């Protein structure tokens, strides 16, 4: 029997299973849990659910995201206990850094330096493009959302599902499975379990994405009116793209995520791209498709990552420069 905090019983560096991850977590005395920059519901829900369970188990824990500040207000719906702190207040050298839904060190944003200052790191992720940046990793590209991996770790930690945990997990599950369009029966079974434990989908999803400022109607109309169809792109499958200028992106930062789905609906078997100018000549690009061409490959070639049907990257340049790069990568991935 090892003393608490002793690491003699801990798994070595490299891949771990949920039980191994739980052992690492239980032994820690100071944990910083993070998700990727511009957190979505899978990153935030994973981080908050895990941190909530750790805090209940008596493990001191903080949650943060590497920017941009502030995190979307809607994510407050997942954090009733106020576990999330601004990245400027995140511990400088935690004993353990846990990253959720983060495929590469770069996606830690302002908190990437914690990989060097933390005693060790544990990555929990479901991206095929995961780069292996952490000391230990629980990574399953077959999992439709990181929250499924978190659920497995919570089981190993002996955490009881309650409304707070269930809402955080459900938000990530619902979002990353496209509203249970993919993820199969495993996702639906977990969804049912979470609803039974107090995740109330209608109210939760209304808090997360169901209400918008009135001004968004006109802003969205302008973005959609600027959309372009390029039928010969992506090896002839077609590309529908639109751009959000920096003023609109700043004013409606939390609102724009759903636009790329609207573009995809008009793209047939082709690809949709939303180019959001987050700063002068700095772009965040969301890609959506139908699995072929492999958008993870396209985004990785452009400095990002993701999944075959949903990927993204950040890059500087003019809009036309980015579009030229994107067209070239789509063609080569379609070849
Ligand atoms: P979204 O378009 O919703 O921001 O992201 C879709 C998918 O692509 C997510 O799995 C997300 O993690 C990934 N992704 C989006 N942007 C980036 C990026 O800049 N770098 C990497 N590595 N992955 C990204
Ligand atoms: Mn995810």
Image (cartoon, rainbow, N blue to C red):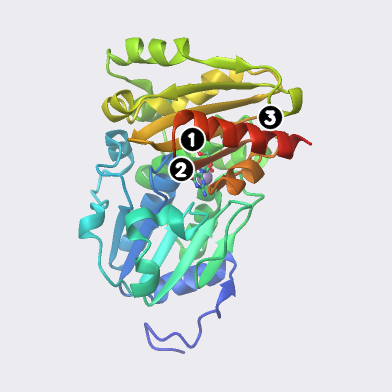
Which residue occupies the foreground of this view, 178 or 104?
104
Give the residue furthest to the right.
335
Are dots 2 and 1 in contact, CB under 8 Å?
A: yes
Location of residue 334 in the rendering, given as x and y in whole percent from the top left corner: 75, 35
Q: Secondary structure at mark 1?
A: strand
Which residue occupies the foreground of this view, 99 or 172?
99
Look at mark 1 in the image and give the residue it sits on. Answer: 285
What residue is rendered at 34% in x and 59% in y? 111
Label 1 C-beta lies within 8 Å of the nearest ligand 1 atom:
yes
Q: CA distance from mark 3 to mark 2?
A: 23 Å
Q: Evaluate whether residue 333 shows in this view.
A: yes
Question: How would you rate the neighbour count of disc 3 (Cα within 10 Å): few for under 14, some for 14-19, many for 20 or more?
Answer: some
Look at mark 2 in the image and give the residue it sits on. Answer: 315
Location of residue 73 in the rendering, given as x and y in whole percent from the top left corner: 27, 35
What residue is rendered at 30% in x and 54% in y? 64
Q: Comparing marks 2 and 1, which lies closer to the viewer?
A: 2
Location of residue 45 in the rendering, given as x and y in whole percent from the top left corner: 41, 45
Are dots 3 and 1 in contact, CB under 8 Å?
A: no
Q: Quadrant of residue 144?
A: top right
Q: Evaluate whether residue 160 shows in this view.
A: no
What residue is rendered at 63% in x and 31% in y? 327
In the image, 309: left or right of 31? Answer: right
Look at mark 3 in the image and give the residue it sits on. Answer: 290
Q: Comparing marks 3 and 2, which lies closer to the viewer?
A: 2
In the image, 328: left or right of 34? Answer: right
Between discs 3 and 1, the one toward the N terminus:
1
Between discs 2 and 1, the one toward the N terminus:
1
Q: Quadrant of the C terminus?
A: top right
Between discs 3 and 2, the one toward the N terminus:
3
């Amino acid at each position: 029997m090892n003393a608490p905090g002793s690491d003699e019983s801990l798994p070595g560096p490299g891949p771990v299973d949920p039980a191994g991850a739980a052992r690492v977590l239980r032994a820690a005395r100071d944990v910083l849990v993070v998700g990727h920059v511009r957190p979505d519901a899978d990153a935030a829900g994973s981080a908050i659910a895990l941190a909530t369970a750790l805090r209940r188990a008596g493990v001191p824990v903080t949650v943060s995201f590497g920017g941009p500040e502030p995190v979307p207000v809607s994510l407050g719906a997942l954090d009733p206990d106020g576990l999330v702190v601004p990245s400027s207040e995140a511990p400088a050298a935690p004993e353990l850094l846990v990253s959720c839904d983060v495929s590469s060190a770069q996606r830690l944003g302002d908190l990437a330096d914690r990989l060097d200052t933390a005693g060790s790191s544990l990555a929990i992720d479901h991206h095929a493009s995961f780069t292996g940046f952490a000391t230990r990793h629980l990574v399953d590209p077959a999992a439709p959302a990181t929250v499924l991996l978190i659920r497995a770790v919570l089981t190993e930690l002996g955490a009881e599902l309650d409304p707070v945990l269930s809402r955080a997990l459900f938000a990530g599950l619902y979002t990353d499975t496209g509203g249970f369009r993919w993820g199969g029966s495993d996702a639906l079974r977990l969804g049912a379990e979470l609803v039974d434990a107090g995740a109330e989908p209608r109210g939760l999803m209304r808090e997360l994405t169901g209400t918008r400022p009135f001004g968004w109607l006109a802003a969205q109309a302008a973005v959609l009116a600027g959309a372009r169809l390029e039928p010969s792109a992506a090896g002839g499958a077609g590309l529908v793209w639109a751009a959000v200028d920096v003023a609109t992106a700043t004013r409606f930062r939390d609102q724009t995520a759903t636009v790329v789905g609207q573009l995809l609906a008009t793209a047939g078997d082709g690809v949709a791209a939303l180019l959001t100018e987050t700063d002068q000549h700095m772009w965040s690009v969301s890609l959506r498709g139908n699995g072929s061409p492999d958008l993870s490959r396209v985004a990785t070639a452009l400095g990002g990552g993701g999944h075959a049907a949903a990927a993204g990257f950040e890059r500087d340049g003019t809009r036309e420069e980015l579009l030229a790069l994107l067209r070239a990568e789509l063609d080569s991935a379609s070849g």
